[in-house]
Image (cartoon, grey):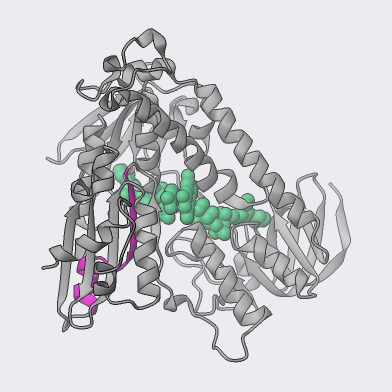
Amino acid sequence: MSTASSVKRFDAIVIGSGQGGTPLASALAQAGKQTALIEKAHIGGCCINEGCTPTKTMVASGRAAYIVSRASDYGVWNLSNPHAGKADDLSASKPDRGWDQIRGVVDMEQVRQRKRDIVESWRGGSEARVKGQKGLELFMGEASFKDANTLTVKLLEGQEVTVAAETIFIDTGDRPARPRLPGLDDVDQTRVLDSTSIMELGAVPDHLVILGGGYIGLEFGQLFRRLGSQVTILQRGKQLAPREDPEIADALRKVLVEDGITVLLNSSATSVKSAHPEEVSVAYKNEQGEEATITGSHLLLAAGRTPNTDMLNLQAAGVKSDASGHIPVDEKLQTNVSHIYAIGDVKGGPAFTHVSYDDFRILRDTLISPSPSQPPRKVSDRVIPYVMYTDPQLAHVGLHESEARKKYPNATIKTASMPMAYVARALETDESRGLMKAVVDDGTKQILGFTCFGIEGGEIMSIVQTAMLGKLPYPVLQDAIFAHPTLAESLNNVWGYLK
Ligand SMILES: Cc1cc2nc3c(=O)[nH]c(=O)nc-3n(C[C@H](O)[C@H](O)[C@H](O)COP(=O)(O)OP(=O)(O)OC[C@H]3O[C@@H](n4cnc5c(N)ncnc54)[C@H](O)[C@@H]3O)c2cc1C
Ligand SMILES: NC(=O)c1ccc[n+]([C@@H]2O[C@H](COP(=O)([O-])OP(=O)(O)OC[C@H]3O[C@@H](n4cnc5c(N)ncnc54)[C@H](O)[C@@H]3O)[C@@H](O)[C@H]2O)c1
């Protein structure tokens, strides 16, 4: 290993090629700032390589398997698997929905290859854009602070370089958390999966036991059920998706149970062991407080994520992190050291690609091209939507009922819940599971929050989000002409259930 004696100086350094860091580095370079982008693994960060893109690509394969399993519901023979005979053999009327047979017709290697191809093409596109950007130098290696303006980069090829800048942006994201469970390190590690390694499986697991009932546990749980695995989800809390409205979370649980997933609530894992080489067992405290054990072929760890700050040597720069390792920031994304900013998941709070990208926009509007007429937006100004890609999707924007009542104690808060079974388009397509729920201030008629747990819930939610952005009162949607029979048309009716 050789150490470079000189320091390479830049106007700005971005650490991490995540969803905010990559466009930020390009925007800085385009604004004439000599910029360094340091990335230790691959361009595009988690979203493109291990997060949104690969998971949603695989979820599409799961959806195809689901539709095949339901072919007879639509009066269609199972063309994908002529050996199975009439699609009736896989019909929804069977208690197990024919999942074992589906497993027999799923080519997991092809599912994986389709995912790899899409990831590679997205990553390649991002890489080409970064490498083609004038004024932007890419360092492939791991960065750590030497002092508040200087970083050491351990390049992937082995050498070290030292870089320095007046302004530094941290966009290092997070990684799967590994719970401290006795026995976890002693079992066959090929049977212990995280959100990255599970997408590299070449065969469908027999029985996937999932630790955690949040986004990752639920998206993968339903996906692998649809590909033919037996699935058991162990969730510590009293509901799945703990931040959601309890009515919605319960509807989600019912859908997953209907799909044949075993959901164990109020169940906290206590240890892991393996009595047989092809099995992994999780001991847990069940709802009654008794010790119980669940045994599967594989264990997916989906119990949250750990911020990538431990390797940054933040103390050398004087940057504070909190007990969880996240870097607290102010309204302008500044850390406690004024020339060092943190964006994306590493700062804590909602961990979504669109939040990291919006962090970039806030910095662009504050530091690179401020508007002469408008003050820059602040972190607290934004309303954050999100979609969990279960099927049906669980999409939400704004406040939940309990949050609205707490935030506006003197307002007349009303809520409307409408089953998706009342939506013509959902019935026609036989995809009517779930419900939508709206929260309004009935004094001002403003929409405070909206959830759609239903087919294409993300798209329906985005319509309501647009109305909220424009501060449209709900009666405007109630009386709007929507084309028939769209899913959007349901936004005429939901407000009729307000109480
Ligand atoms: C399985 C999964 C599915 C997801 N699905 C969705 C979804 O559907 N929609 C959604 O909005 N969000 C989704 N997310 C979350 C989303 O991926 C993240 O919120 C988003 O990627 C965060 O972006 P970021 O900018 O914080 O950093 P990241 O994208 O995490 O990028 C950080 C980068 O920094 C690099 N790095 C770390 N430390 C260093 C260092 N010391 N030196 C140099 N480089 C370093 C890392 O290698 C990485 O490339 C998903 C996440 C996972 C895990
Ligand atoms: N569609 C999307 O936007 C999407 C998809 C995937 C991930 N993500 C992002 O990634 C983040 C991480 O996802 P995640 O699912 O790992 O975390 P999460 O925080 O959403 O859920 C983790 C769950 O694990 C449970 N848990 C923790 N320890 C446990 C234990 N010992 N036993 C049983 N249950 C336990 C928690 O109660 C919690 O419900 C999410 O917060 C989300 O922001 C987003």
Vertical side of 89 occupied by 348: above or below: below
Along the horizontal axis of the image, is 487 left or right of 4? left
Please report the residue visible at 32 percent of the width from the left and 61 percent of the height from the top.
482
> Where does the image place residue 144, in percent across and percent down from the top left?
68, 60
Please give the count of numbered marks on the rendered protein. Answer: 0
> Where does the image place residue 221, in percent across and percent down from the top left?
35, 36
Which quadrant of the figure has residue 294? top left
> Where does the image place residue 10, in percent across and percent down from the top left?
80, 71
> Where does the image place residue 35, in percent across and percent down from the top left?
77, 68
Which quadrant of the figure has residue 130? bottom right
Magenta segment: 392-407
Vertical side of 357 occupied by 61: above or below: above
Vertical side of 71 occupied by 481: above or below: below
Along the horizontal axis of the image, is 497 left or right of 8? left
Q: Is residue 239 visible?
A: no
Please report the residue visible at 24 percent of the width from the left and 68 percent of the height from the top.
478
Please report the residue visible at 64 percent of the width from the left and 69 percent of the height from the top.
169
Magenta stretch contains residue 490: no
Which quadrant of the figure has residue 73? top left
In this view, the residue farthest toward the bottom is 373
Q: Is residue 483 visible?
A: yes
The quarter of the image holding the C terminus is bottom left
Please report the residue visible at 14 percent of the width from the left and 67 percent of the height from the top.
498
Magenta stretch contains residue 401: yes
